[in-house]
Amino acid sequence: MDPIRPAADGAPFSEGASAAPDLAELLKASGRGDRAAFARLYDATASRVVGLAVRVVRDPAQAEEVAQEAFLEIWRTSGRFDPAKGSPLGWLLTIVHRKAVDRVRSAEASTRRDTTYHSQNQPVDHDSTAEAAQASLEARRVRQALSGLTPVQREALELAYFGGYTHTEVATMLELPVGTAKTRIRDGLIRLRDTMGVGA
């Protein structure tokens, strides 16, 4: 085994191959505010942390963010690590996993909110529905008003406005002079307007 001697900053290192860092000690030192220890902890575990984050969130960019959030929490809470309750790497990866799951749940909740918002705020065809309802009401009112016309007025109006015929065609169909057909249509409209209470 390579002899170990202290580095300039007091951290042990091995001549030749570097010895695996003692994560528990690095966590303890980080808990005391030792930034150099935390930097070594970061270097020793970053690939595992990001790898786990990628496996959970399945998006490298978001995995990097999750890793940064996890390391921030690790820096803040490293003093709480208890070696009696588990390994330092297990403790670290538990934090990472929780952060990654939180990110996935947050994204899913956001997607659900967006879906709900869009479904609730889709332009409903309420305009056409309202128009159809209004048209139905108007048709009912017109039919009621038509019943108050004379038979000849009603017949002329129905041909002109419901049948779509011209005054000349109405006159031909009713075997009337065009002027008479126009008069019946006009008188029928006036009476219809008065019955329905529609302004001129």
Image: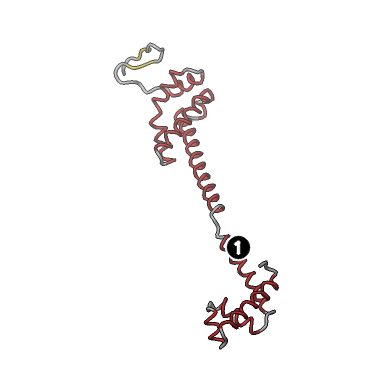
In the picture of the structure, the residue carrying the numbered disc 1 is: 130
Q: Secondary structure at mark 1?
A: helix
Q: Which residue, as the protein is rendered here, is positioned at the far left?
A: 16
Q: How far across and how far down the image is residue 26, in percent?
A: 45, 21
Q: Residue at x 54, y 86 (%)?
A: 173
Q: Nearer the viewer, residue 90 or 155?
A: 155
The kind of residue tagged 1 is Ala
Looking at the image, what colour scheme do you see? secondary structure
Location of the N terminus by quadrant is top left
Q: Residue at x 64, y 84 (%)?
A: 152
Q: Nearer the viewer, residue 64 or 118?
A: 118
Location of the C terminus by quadrant is bottom right
Q: Which residue, as the protein is rendered here, is positioned at the far top?
A: 8
Q: Residue at x 40, y 29 (%)?
A: 46
Displayed quadrant of residue 175: bottom right
Q: How far across and how far down the image is residue 29, in percent?
A: 48, 18
Q: How far across and how far down the image is residue 54, in percent?
A: 41, 38
Q: Nearer the viewer, residue 147 or 137?
A: 147
Q: Which residue, as the protein is rendered here, is positioned at the far bottom?
A: 175
Residue 145 to residue 176: above or below: above
Left or right of residue 58: residue 78: right
Q: How many marks?
A: 1
Q: How far across and how far down the image is residue 56, in percent?
A: 44, 40
Q: Residue at x 59, y 79 (%)?
A: 182
Q: Nearer the viewer, residue 108 or 84?
A: 108
Displayed quadrant of residue 2: top left
Near mark 1 (Cα within 10 A), the count class, few <14, some 14-19 or many ≥20, is few
